[in-house]
Amino acid sequence: MSKTLKDLAPGEKARIKAVSGNGSVRRRIIEMGLVPGVELTMERYAPLGDPVEVSNPGFFLSLRKEEADTIVLEENAEEEQ
């Protein structure tokens, strides 16, 4: 089972492996700069768990959990750092 962005704990870093999904949601995520190879840090979850906030040097981004679930992460990204 692949780890997705919604599985990260606050403070954890990971690198994007792929963006799954289809149609406008996938296109919107890619247009926001979340493409394979980008490293993200999970900043926080909203009090009720949705949305989630991630950061990359230069920007913060909030995503719904269902959108975060379409972002597949590399397995050992945190070990490479």
Image: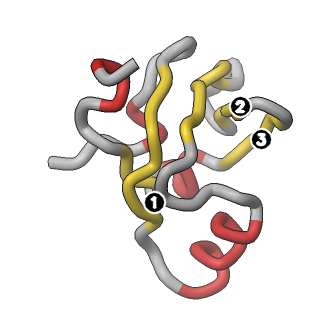
Instruction: Locate residue 59: give its quadrant.
Output: top right
Residue position for label 2: 55
Return the residue nearer the eye: 18 or 68: 18
Which residue shows up at 71% across the image and 31% down it? 55
The picture places residue 20, in percent across and down from the top left corner, at: 41, 69
Check disc 1 and give the amino acid type.
Answer: Thr
- Quadrant containing the C terminus is top left
> With 29 as the anchor, is 65 left or right in this view?
left
Label annotation for residue 70 = 1
Residues tagged 3 and 1 counted as in contact (Cβ below 8 A): no
Instruction: Label 3: state its secondary structure.
Output: strand
Instruction: Locate residue 23: give its quadrant.
Output: bottom right
Instruction: Locate residue 61: give its quadrant.
Output: top right
Check disc 2 and give the amino acid type.
Answer: Ser
Q: Earlier in the sequence, mark 3 or mark 2?
A: 2
The picture places residue 33, in percent across and down from the top left corner, at: 71, 59
Question: In the figure, 11 relative to 32: above or below?
Answer: above
Return the residue nearer the eye: 79 or 13: 79
Residue position for label 3: 61
Which residue shows up at 63% across the image and 74% down it? 25
Which residue shows up at 59% across the image and 26% down it? 41
